[in-house]
Image (cartoon, grey):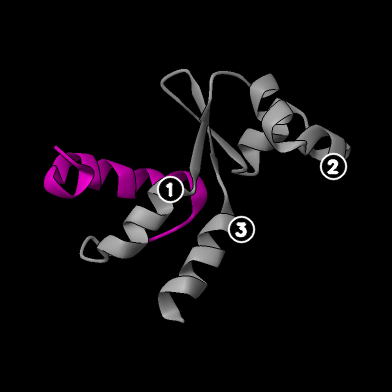
Amino acid sequence: MTMAENTLVKCMFLELLEREFQLRLDEQDTEKIELARQSIEIYDNVEAFYKATGWRRDNPEEAETEYLLEHKILALEQGKFLYFSRIRYEDGLKRLEG
């Protein structure tokens, strides 16, 4: 069963996007929801996030875990760190609109 077929999962995902990443999407906008799903990366720990993204190297003054969580760069859900790639999402929106 996909997210599109499961209303509860879809609603929980939309709530997560709004609460943690300030992205509000309409439940009917399936293309944007799928794009948002593809724009989330999941990490077991902050070190894995640093390694995959180079965040600590590129943003040393903004690399503390507390900063990342407080400024909604990462979200901590069920013991996993979620990163929403706004660049990937925005690029995808341009492709959808173009």
Is label 1 in a helix, a strand or a loop? helix
Q: Foreground residue, 79 or 43?
A: 43
Measured Cα–Cα span from mark 2 to mark 1: 23 Å
Question: What crowding class fits label 2: few (fewer than 14 Cα within 10 Å), some (14-19), or many (20 or more)?
Answer: few
Q: Foreground residue, 94 or 68?
A: 94
Is label 3 in a helix, a strand or a loop? helix
Q: Residue at x 70, y 20 (%)?
A: 47
The residue wearing badge 3 is: 87
For the image, the number of numbered tags is 3
Up the image or down, 33 lies above or below 52; here it is: below
The residue wearing badge 1 is: 38
The stretch of residues the image draws in magenta is 1-25
Is label 2 in a helix, a strand or a loop? helix
Q: Is residue 23 magenta?
A: yes
Q: Residue at x 72, y 27 (%)?
A: 51
Mark number for residue 58?
2
Q: Foreground residue, 13 or 70?
A: 13
